[in-house]
Structure formats: C-alpha cells, structure tokens
Amino acid sequence: MATLNITPAAAQQIRHVLDERGQGLGLRVSVKPSGCSGYSYVLDFADDVSDDEIRFEEHGASVYIAPDALEILNGSEVDYVSEGLNRFFRFNNPNVKDECGCGESFTV
C-alpha cells in the first residue's frame, strides 16, 4: 500500500492557503520531467478530483496524487519549512537517488 506523510506544518499551511482562497479540497502533487536531473515536483490546488487520484489525509489536510506519480512519491513526507525569509513545501522523498546542484530537479 502506498504511503505519503503530511507533517503538521504542511497540513497547517495547506489549510491556511485553502481558507484564504475560499475554495479547494487540498493540495495536488505531481512530478514532471524537468531540469538537469530528471524530475521536478509540481504543486497545484485540488479544486476537483479525478476518480483515479489517490487521496492522503493527515492533520485535517488532504494531498492528491495521480497514479502515474505514485511510484516516484511513495513513502515521501510533505513538510512546510521556513529558512530565513523563504517558506516552502519540502519533499523528503526516500526514492530520490540524486539531486541537481540548484535543487530544482531529482533522479529516482
């Protein structure tokens, strides 16, 4: 069975952004071929859900993943971090074998 963990910080941010927007079911996460290493994460709001998307819920927030991205994202943790002035979602993905120097793409 596939797993995806959502940290309390990520769940709080997802709920906050959806509340500000006034709509949405959760965060949609996918991957696309990109960059010098192979793949990059794609984040979007899930305002509607396809029948084949897989929903993960923790701490009152939902993340939706398309089946074609599940193998790459399986076992990952979605976190929300603050580093200096930067705030962003971070993926702790055990399937990543290498990342490019700029941190924009990864290889599985």
Image (cartoon, rainbow, N blue to C red):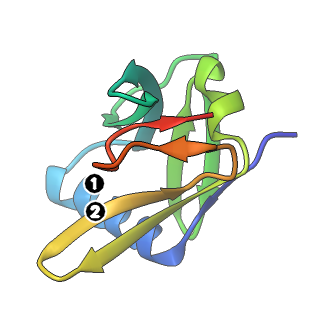
Q: Nearer the viewer, residue 72 or 47?
A: 72
Q: Quadrant of the N terminus?
A: top right
Q: Rate crowding at label 1 as few (under 14), some (14 to 19) or many (20 or more) other CA atoms within 10 Å.
A: some
Q: Nearer the viewer, residue 22 or 57?
A: 57
Left or right: 44 as drawn, with respect to 31: left
Residue position marked by numbered label 1 in the rendering: 18
Q: Residue at x 40, y 26 (%)?
A: 48
Q: Nearer the viewer, residue 44 or 105?
A: 105
Residue 70: numbered disc: none
Depth check, mark 1 against mark 2: the one in front is 2
Q: Nearer the viewer, residue 73 or 50?
A: 73
Q: Quadrant of residue 5?
A: bottom right
Name the kind of residue labelled 1 in the image. Answer: Leu
Q: Residue at x 34, y 49 (%)?
A: 101
Cα gap from disc 1 to disc 2, whole angstroms: 15 Å
The percent position of residue 10, horizontal first and vertical second, equals 43, 67
Q: Rate crowding at label 2 as few (under 14), some (14 to 19) or many (20 or more) other CA atoms within 10 Å.
A: few
Left or right: 83 as drawn, with respect to 10: left
